[in-house]
Amino acid sequence: MSAANTPSVWTFAGNAKDIQGLLAGSARDLPRAALLCLNRSEAATLLGMAALDSLEAVTQAAARLRAAVGEAVVITGDEADYADMPQARGWLGPSAATGHPKSHPDAGAVFANAAAQALEKGFVAMEAIVLACMARNDALSQHTDAGPLQPRADFAQRSANLPFFSLPQATSVSGFTALSDPDLGLYAVVDSAAWVARVVAAGVRTVQLRIKDAEGPEHRDFVRQQIRDSIHATTAAGAQLFINDHWQLAIEESAYGVHLGQEDLHIADLAAIARAGLRLGISTHAYWEVCRAWALRPSYIACGPIHPTQAKAMPWIPQGNNNLAYWCALLPTPVVGIAGMDVARTEQAARAGAAGVAVISAITAAASPEAAIVQLQQAVQRGRSQPRVTAPLLPQPTLLPT
């Protein structure tokens, strides 16, 4: 079989012989699959095992299969699916009680077909299997005995189909305190308490204190005082303040909320944040990161980069307003658009449905930050007064295949 004729997605039904050859080392010239989709029983059969009857057995089987057969592997199960991908590893489960089995005889074919279509559209493997989960979930949710198992055209616009994606360290936390005002509006991101006080005095009612490169113990007293002063300024004005990264100090100082990046989710004590009643915002850049955030039921989800930005080096493709409109339509929680925002783009983001528009340099690098704030707030209002952008059936890919 030539590389040109090799399907991007391999399944047990279509590729068992090739998979066995690669596992045995007798088919070394055969191109590896872009994505291998198997259920637990099929994976066990191929590996010569009686069953994959534990979570550890599934993860080990996926690692073996990926090493020998495919660039990416997903092993599906009745309760959850396990992904071992270049982009991420973890468990995907239904975000709601679907009331339907995942053991329908055609469910695997629906999953594999949807994954193949997503790969053809340029999505990386991890995003492709999120879409495959959504397609399968949708097909099962509305299936009757009268017709074939197939998803609806708008399966990816339905939040009930969106799976949860696990954190590297397991957590049972889900559900954070709701925002006092879900209309976040202009969301200023600044790096000092002085800036917090300045933007609040100029009328901003959602602020993030983002002090970077100050994680060491020698910075602790400085950061604590910055948080205290910021809390004082925002409380007096009735503004919503989020502390970026420094969640321990935010808890100790009884801050309003915390904002975490994906890398922070691996180390932050999410249970402690929830117990303290702090609001939680989470940054996302791709389908699986949205699924990971959504599993936690945060107070809001930030999606980006919407436009190119110099604030942070990232591998992500700028998503644009259509993707922002998609996330705003899909997620039943406030969505914040972030990265590369100026007055025109702020108006566009508001029109896309963003509950908040996060702005950094358009405020802090402006000749007159106060005048810039007025212009940006007016842009939010103009965007909201216009007809809302129609969300696409699918977003655009957010990461270039490697």
Image: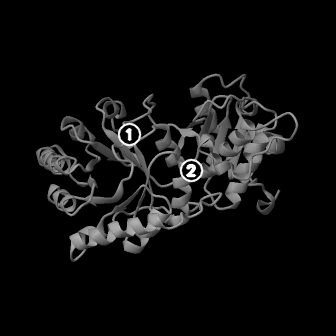
Give the quarter of the image for residue 89.
top right
At x 17%, y 62%, the residue is 198
- The amino acid marked with disc number 2 is Leu
Tell me: residue 372, above or below residue 128.
below
Tell me where residue 240 appears, x and y as whole percent.
Answer: 28, 49
Q: Quadrant of the C terminus?
A: bottom right
The residue beneath circle 1 is: 178
The residue beneath circle 2 is: 330
In this view, which residue lies farthest toward the front?
A: 385
Judged left or right of residue 291, residue 261 is left
Give the quarter of the image for residue 246.
top left
Judged left or right of residue 175, residue 9 is right
Foreground residue among 94 and 312: 94
- The amino acid marked with disc number 1 is Ala
Q: Is residue 33 visible?
A: no
In this view, which residue lies farthest toward the right?
A: 146
Tell me: residue 344, above or below residue 18.
below
Tell me where residue 243 appears, x and y as whole percent.
Answer: 26, 47
Foreground residue among 129 and 361: 361
In this view, which residue lies farthest toward the bottom?
A: 367
